[in-house]
Amino acid sequence: MSVLPTNDPPPHRPPTRSISTVCWAAKGGSGTSVVTASLALSTPPPVVLVDLAGDVPAVLGLSEPAGPGVHDWLASDTPAEQLHDLTVGVTDDVVLLPAGGVRETAGRDRWDDFLSALGSDDHTVLIDAGTGCPPAELHALADRTLLVTRACYLALRRAVAAPLRPSGIVLVAEPGRALRAPDVEAAVGAPVIASVPVDPAVARAVDAGLLSARLPRLVQRELRRAA
Ligand SMILES: Nc1ncnc2c1ncn2[C@@H]1O[C@H](COP(=O)(O)OP(=O)(O)OP(=O)(O)O)[C@@H](O)[C@H]1O
Ligand SMILES: [Mg+2]
């Protein structure tokens, strides 16, 4: 057996990418925080999960982070290099940037610095923007804006009336709805890129604070396609 070094190519690794995705809902309680957190857990690492709305620590069963968060950073002139210092660990592969306290609007340059700094080192950036349109600057700068919605007429009316078109839809699919994925696509004018079932196992995992350990396989598989 030869012990000489060879010129063989290094073992294949899947390509890493730095993509920023903003998730939002037109109507409260659609499942945005659960979908965004689950998407983070289903995305090839490393991942930064950003909480603009404030529920992600609870969704993941983490204690409420005490320090400053993304809103404090946006409202300050703290250098971009310090953004990663505000994160807390979720798993070996995912860190969370908590919401923090101060809620003010931020200009395009600040959002630009934010996305550039977080996306460095090939981190995929996933943002829970909560209910209502995300900030226009963030929508303009992010790679993707995903609408999280149920096939609910009331939610779809609001999505259609919103001043922005999402690049894709994550459908939170409940049994018994009259509207189906093609109806949702036609109404919103964007493709359904993942369909996450309403599953009592998801709700139980969230209530127990165990989503990262007990994300159902079906949900993970579906969201991997959207990652
Ligand atoms: N796929 C799912 N299957 C079962 N239950 C779910 C699913 N997604 C979310 N839920 C449950 O629905 C409720 C609302 O979810 P979530 O907090 O993610 O919604 P939201 O859109 O972020 O709400 P908000 O408008 O308050 O930000 C929670 O109780 C959650 O456990
Ligand atoms: Mg939420």
Image (cartoon, rainbow, N blue to C red):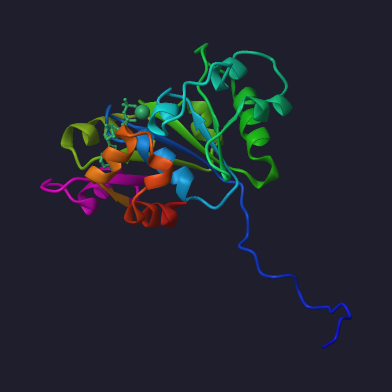
Ligand 2 positioned in quadrant: top left
41 left or right of 198 in image: right
Residue 42: % across, % down: 46, 50
77 left or right of 33 in image: right
Quarter of the image with the N terminus in it: bottom right
114, above or below 68, in the image:
below
Q: For the point 58% across and 16% down, which residue is it?
A: 67
State whether residue 146 appears in this view.
Answer: no
Q: Which residue is farthest bottom?
A: 1
- Is 2 one of the magenta-colored residues? no
Residue 145: % across, % down: 44, 39
211 left or right of 204 in image: right
> Is 58 or 75 nearer to us in this picture?
58
Span colored in magenta: 168-194
Residue 93: % across, % down: 57, 45
> Is 223 or 92 nearer to us in this picture?
92
> Is 71 or 66 nearer to us in this picture?
66
60, above or below 7, in the image:
above
State whether residue 95 appears in this view.
Answer: yes
202, above or below 85, in the image:
below
Residue 30: % across, % down: 27, 34
Q: For the point 33% across and 34% down, which residue is it?
A: 208
Q: Which residue is farthest right?
A: 4
- Is 187 one of the magenta-colored residues? yes
Could you tell me how many numbered marks the image carries?
A: 0
